[in-house]
Image (cartoon, rainbow, N blue to C red):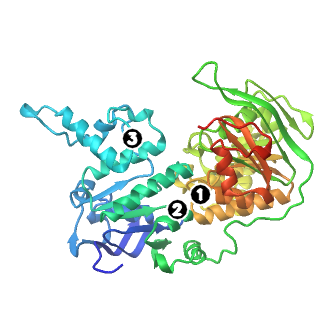
Amino acid sequence: MDGPALLEMRHVTKRFPGTVALRGVHLEAHRGEVLALVGENGAGKSTLMKILSGAYPCTSYEGEILLDGVPLRFHSPRDAEHAGIEMIYQEMRLHLDLTIAENICLGRWPRRCWGLVDWPAVTRSAGSLLADIGLPVSPSTIVRNLSVSQQQLVAIAKALSRTPRILVLDEPTSALTEREAEHLHQRIVQMRDRGLCCIYISHKMQDVLRIADRITVLRDGQTISSYPRDQVEPGRVIEDIVGRKVEQMFPKVRVEIGDEVLRAENFTVRHPYTSHKNIIEDVSIDVRRGEILGLAGLVGAGRSELVNAIFTGSAASGAVYVDGRHVPIDSPSDAIAAGIALVTEDRARNGYVGWLDVAANVTLASLDKISFLTRIDSRKERAVAASCIRMLDIKAAGLDAALFSLSGGNQQKVVLAKWLNTSPKVLILDEPTRGIDIGAKVRIYELMGELARQGIAIVMISSELPELLALCDRFIVLANGRVVDRFGKSEASEHRIMHAATGMVPASTGLERAAPP
């Protein structure tokens, strides 16, 4: 952009024991600009932003930070805040059992005489900020009662209350729907137009291309390239990120689709907290050998609840058939024995055990293959894990590395390896690429094609419509716990999926019209 940079980070080098995380990185950002910072997990983005936010003090790295041309040295996050730099982390740091107003003013209470908190001023200040970012809720609302997207906007309001000059957003749409992400993007653009500098970190190229005025790419701790909006070529940016030529972002393999492998009939799932209410109501799905079935719908439509009920046997009613044979499923072990595997949406909560090492996690679901009676054969365990690391290109310090030490993309590959070791007939993938970098996404897409070619039936849930449309052979759309549309690849479009997901199903489908969510 024209004019001097508001922010410059020059020749930044950061070392950790045994590794160099950043090597002479240069970054600049301007007033009234959205700068997208992109790169694979481990490229150095978070490290660079922790330096900018003061989380890593100035004594721990080499290089300099300049704001309006003036060198600054941050010893703590408070120093960065005083300079006008605010960071909103992917894991939002809100107090869920306090009100919105209390969260926004926490630590900076407006005072009355004798040091008492001026609560009307707290409410007025929070209400003004909520109106400014377009969040139509009361400042007295408990944060726990908000949706994830609303909590994200509260975090932004809290940051804006300090009148920052630079706002850093780390993966702000990772847990949002398309509609929620679009709303957030509109607010970011409004802030940019008022002169705020936004640094936007994301693995979602669609978001980056939609909102960024400029894109800076980091790879292996170095600045690789920086492009203004009018010079951005998506293919070139992806090549810069992964360090190699990517022929296709969504490599779809042509596979001959075979006989039916899985059929789930008439599934009904009760609401866990509300009596006399069902999350899923009389839903049936089927998937064939070599087929990738896309389960589409908005968050809350019941997609995850359906596949979890199939896998755990927690449905109030419904029957599962594998290869045409009825299979009673009362627990995950029954599903595994029947050849069904589920990569869950929240890998950190129920996909892996973080304090266990890579080898143990890879074999968690297939202990019968590496054990005799109650004893695990550690040689077999390590051999299986080593084979998976090679096959999926998992980057880890070694088989003994704890899962917590791996990047998000490599954690997801370990979860996939765990289920592939069970030799599944059906692989259910719930948001398999959420929060992981582009290189890891492409590898997972390639793996899905390889598995389909081997005859494995795949059920895929994704909130990213471009990947769903590119990879799937057939689609089922859910809304309010019911199937509202079914169609093949030749009939598929973003418009048709969103039309159905929002409850506006064309009469020609012959399916029941869902009430608007």
Q: Position of residue 302 (x, y in %)?
A: 66, 37
Amino acid bearing label 2: Asp
Can residue 478 be seen in the rendering of this structure? yes
Is the Cβ of the residue at disc 3 closer than 8 Å to that at disc 2?
A: no
- Answer whether residue 224 is visible to the viewer in this image: no
Between 79 and 501, the one nearer to me in the picture: 501
N-terminal of the pair, mark 2 or mark 1, is 2
Among the two numbered marks 3 and 1 on one chain, the one whose residue lies closer to the N terminus? 3
Q: Nearer the viewer, residue 205 or 48?
A: 205
Q: Which residue is mark 2?
A: 207
* Image position, residue 44 (x, y; %): 45, 66
- In this view, the residue in front, 219 or 213, is 213
Identify the residue position indicated by label 1 in the image.
409
Q: Residue at x 50, y 55 (%)?
A: 182
Could you tell me the amino acid type at mark 3? Pro
Amino acid of disc 1: Gly
Q: Looking at the image, do the residues carrying marks 2 and 1 touch, with CB atoms under 8 Å apart?
A: no
- Report, in whole angstroms, how far the alpha carbon at label 3 lies from the one at label 1: 36 Å
Whichever of labels 3 and 2 marks the residue nearer the N terminus, that label is 3
The number of discs equals 3
At a point 86% along the width and 48% down the height, the residue shown is 288
Percent across and percent down for residue 172 are: 46, 54
Q: Which residue does the image show at 85% across and 39% down from the upper left?
A: 263
Residue at mark 3: 136
Q: In the picture, which quadrant includes the N terminus?
A: bottom left
- Secondary element at tag 2: helix
Element at label 3: loop
Q: Which mark lies nearer to you, 3 or 2? A: 3
Occupied quadrant, residue 122: top left
